[in-house]
Image: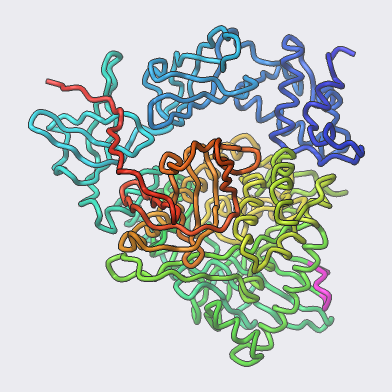
Amino acid sequence: MFIKNIGYLYLQNQSIMAKDKKNKKALSFNKSGLKKAILSVYYENSNQSFNYKQIGAAVGAKDVGELQLVNVVLQELRDADTVVETERGKFRLKSQGGTATGTVEINSKGYGQVRSEELDEPVFVSAANMNHALDGDKVRVRLYARRKRSNPEAEVIEVIERAKTTFVGTIDISQFSAFLVPNKKTPFDLFIPKDKLMGAKHGQKAVARIMDWPERARNPFAEIIDVLGDAGNNNTEMHAILAEFGLPYGYPEAVNQAADRISTVITEEEISKRRDFRGVPTFTIDPADAKDFDDALSIQKLENGYWEVGVHIADVTFYVKPESLLEDEAYNRATSVYLVDRVVPMLPEILSNGVCSLRPNEDKLCFSAVFQIDDNSLVINEWFGRTIIHSDRRFAYEDAQQVIETGEGDLKEEILTLDRLAKQLRAIRFENGSIGFDRVEVKFEIDKDGKPLSVFFKESKDSNKLIEEFMLLANKRVAEFVGKPGAKKKERTLVYRIHDKPDPDKLDSFNHFIKRFGYGIQTNNPQTVTASMNKLIENVAGKKEQNVIETLAIRTMAKAEYSTRNIGHYGLGFEYYTHFTSPIRRYPDMMVHRLLQRYLEDGRSVQADQYEGMCKHSSEMENRAASAERASIKYKQVEFMADKIGQQFKGVISGVKEWGIYVEIDENKCEGMVPLFELTDDFYEFDEKNYCIIGRRSHKKYQLGDVIEVEIARANLEKKQLDFRIVGEELPPQRIKTPARGRKKYS
């Protein structure tokens, strides 16, 4: 056989199989593990080209699904410039010599590492060898000869692509110079010439853009492009969070004007092209404070005895045309952003809250998925197309929940029937492999100035689940209609919402951890993983360890993302899944609407490559939005606890790192950290495998999930950081650290 060490490679990359002494069937490949396996084959055969079937044989991929995943990974490696396509369908490792391309991760001290798919492990890069690379940049590094018993090292020789060129920080003006001091992950300040301050004053927050970074200069030269306002002001801080993650906080005037010009008149000609649901009982169910209603449900009993359920989605693409200003703005944003005290919509409010929003007692244009469903919630027939609706009632979740619980209220027959059907759909979904994470959502009561007054928790109830099930049904059936090949149709390009299988090693570590609580999951195949994970979630409900175990369980799962390369949705247990139901707030849904309409009109399949790039952009913007949301919550948590210094709270250890232990307070879910250097009774060492720190002398252990009592020691709004101390521990004198930031006087 031309591929060397096949047995070794197969066992190496099916680590659970190697560990399983009972020789049970191992958990199927996930994308990350398969990528490592494929690269191992290429490293061993660097001058040879292989097709996906040859690679599949080498790594032990047997069934159609695994071979399809091999093909997906090879395309991704080609896109990343790691392998080259030597001829159609055949790939060879790209010759790299003594260099590699990857992403740099820099800590607050200026040094860090570069991760590359071309290398088996990350390489260390000293601060002196960063050569002006910034955190997140795509770089090319020169690899150094490896010394014995040392980590591999490298030097950045080229910055290929900047992750960001704008930075948020605080203005520091002295007699001779001005700087923007960014957050702690940036190990240098930005020098601002006095004529580039844009009126910013000392102590204000602002956004700066790098103009130049001379080779010998310690600091980049930058200009202020926006003054956010005074530090501590709520709007200033929320805008700073958005800017930090490269997210917009306003609309260009030209975009607002384009939105204002959109006609709200629905012509008879347009109505004649659509299926009319205005006479069918229809309603929306949304959060009480929602303003953009992008989905509605209708239901009626048909003469054939089946239920006709319409999932009606705002027809955004009717109003937002390709190559328009509104289209470009929607694509660039890709998503609405939900901060703790506001929504930053993907589309201007005149569209998101007005023209497109399915408000009650108004005719609205929709793109709908309509199902005929029997009393057992089996889909007998389906129809997709453009419609016009008239919502009879706008329900908040609480309103609909009251109808479900009491059996009384507006549209009670319709809501109770949909609730019954939804519960059956949910049961079917879980029987087929869905995993059910129902996390408690932490919310703040906030005054008019943005100050958090109290914390409360929102749980998902039947009214939430009713909407969820019919949205999942529509998303799944649209994906199957377009993507699933059949006797009379070929597979067509679509934007899928994909979710990879979990990493076997992470599952193994998770299983090891939960055993200390008396729990366990079966990891021998995907079906037993999902069944036992659902059983675990059921068993921990209401227990003190619930939040820690559910949080860690979620961390073992892969992240969902958008792609034209379908690998299914593991968490939902769906072979085909897309996002069709929220085009007001998600750009991928707009892409799906356009593709679905194209295929309903018998249009040819589009080229996947262009859409794959749009998928990656959408996934990246979604991640940024999620990070900004978490940052805003963290800021409000710190602000809420700032007047509670010295007060004591019971909490649970929610995270353990080499620099400290994180504790989540039971009564309000606010999280803070006990720095390791402040545990002065012993020298504590980090045990990553067992999620704990252990005292070298006393063997005292602090482990993930432990219940402890803490006192609020410090609240740093600038860093969005709460510092705790363990009750009974002495707090050492405050250590004042001056960041090792690059500073140099410029004339």
Q: Describe residue 299's horizontal placement relative to residue 127 as left or right.
A: right
Give the residue at x 59% y 72%: 296
- Tell me if residue 380 is in the magenta stretch: yes
For the view shown, which residue lies furthest in the front direction?
698
Q: Is residue 158 above or below residue 546?
A: above
* Residue 696: percent from left, percent from top: 55, 35
Q: Is residue 390 above or below residue 439?
A: below
Q: Describe residue 619's horizontal placement relative to residue 341 as left or right.
A: right
Give the residue at x 74% y 70%: 371
Judging depth in this view, the residue of 578 and 531 nearest the camera is 531
Say which quarter of the image contains residue 649.
Answer: bottom left
How many marks are shown on the rendered structure? Answer: 0
* Viewport quadrant of the N terminus: top right
* Viewport quadrant of the C terminus: top left
Judging depth in this view, the residue of 61 and 660 nearest the camera is 660
Magenta part of the protein: which range?
374-381
Q: Is residue 41 above or below residue 553?
A: above
Res. 477 in view: no
